[in-house]
Amino acid sequence: MTLPSIDWNYPTAVRFGPGRIKDLPAICGEFGIERPLLVTDPGLAGLPMVSAAIEANAAAGVATALFSDVRANPVAADIEAGIAVYRAGGHDGVIAMGGGSALDAGKVVAFMAGQTRPLWDFEDVGDWWTRADPNGIAPIVAVPTTAGTGSEVGRAGVILDTATHTKKIIFHPKMLPGVVILDPQLTVGLPPHVTAATGMDALSHALEAYCAPGFHPMADGIALEAIRIIAEFLPRAVRDGGDLEARGHMLVAASMGATAFQKGLGGMHALAHPIGALFDTHHGLTNAVLMPYVLAFNRVFIERRIDRLAGYIGLADPSFDSFMTWLLDIRRELGVPHNLSGLRVDPARRDELAAMAACDPSAGGNPRLFDAAAATTVLDAAFTGRVGEGE
């Protein structure tokens, strides 16, 4: 299949197709951005895709500076450094380019560039977002180079608070990028293990959104199709990094998962956030490890939904058990560790992790009450590797 070059406008303006990065200068022009700050991570900063984007902008008269001091789990100091560069350079917009960390950092830099209150005043708590001056939020162009977080279509950024060792969500509706470039050619260089981990992150978003309680048929529909796409194309993308069709579909699935999880997330993310904060684990891989244990814990509340999902993705036996078998098989195929020891998570800190998970905003979206006792049950199963405990 030849991938199309196509535009759509949900949940924001999206430019999809191989080679669409060439549209970056024109997009900056559409938004009146003349001096953007390109925010990325150290690993990407020296790669040709970044220098080519900067050079293409320069050729069109769009002077672009680079900021790349962004950690794998961005901290407040990274944001403060980016804001300082943004203000000192007199920039008028942000190009957030990279994986989830770079996208989150870029969005939060753009958000905070014109604010006077401190970062944590805008945590996603109640109506704290209304504290912000919306006129101080810089325009954002998002260019994902991985297919996982879907941060390019999100209205928030996850930042690590080093004082409390917790990941906090900074939210504002105007943090949604004005334009997203989904160019699968930019993801071709990803190694198999990164492709697998980020792809499983996309699956965790769609799966938790689908299982979240509440009435949101649009989110459910998007989540279902995202899971079907991932089931078909993630193994292909891992086996052959040059499979442009698989790469393109995974980029779309990642954006779909993040669009769907406006409905809610759940226990996977409630646990993955503190585990990542304390042990600096890869977020997508952490979700992948936790996935079967959280599903098993929630089984009585989600079984009928998972039955329908199993049928939709084409499993011969449309049941919870067949879906769990499929999930365990794809984890094994992609090299996901079966239990938390594979991530070097210390079981001695189980109770601390459980208490933190119960306080995480994602816990409220779990289909079953996810308090500290529930989190402990899931962690015990995830440490031992026994799927099905706590059902």
Image (tube, grey):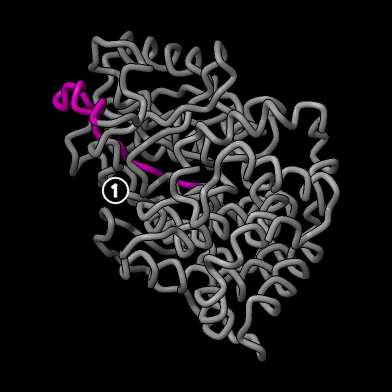
Q: Quadrant of the rendered structure where residue 340 is? A: top right
- Which residue ends up furthest to the left in the rendered image? 135
The relative height of residue 342 versus residue 78 in the rendered view (above or below) is: below
Report whether 11 appears left or right of 296. left
Q: Amino acid at mark 1?
A: Val
Q: Position of residue 195 (x, y in %)?
A: 66, 54
Dot 1: element = strand
> Percent position (x, y) of residue 289?
72, 51
Front residue of 327 and 59: 327
- x 44%, y 18%: residue: 79
Q: Which is more toward the observer, 228 or 96?
A: 228
Is 177 inside the magenta-drawn segment? no
Image quarter where the C terminus lies is: bottom right
Q: Taking 183 as reference, is 375 left or right?
A: right
Residue sitting nearer the eye, 3 or 137: 137
Identify which residue, 52 or 118, lies in the foreground. Answer: 118
Counting every numbered tag in the picture gives: 1
The residue drawn where x is 27% and y is 64% is 8
User: Can residue 19 be seen at all in this image of the molecule?
Assistant: no
Q: Where residue 35 appears, x then y in whole percent?
A: 28, 25
Q: Is residue 285 above or below residue 119?
A: below
| Magenta stretch, residue numbers | 127-144
- Image quadrant assignment for residue 350: top right
Q: Residues within 10 Å of mark 1 (few under 14, many from 20)?
A: many
Q: Which residue is mark 1?
A: 179
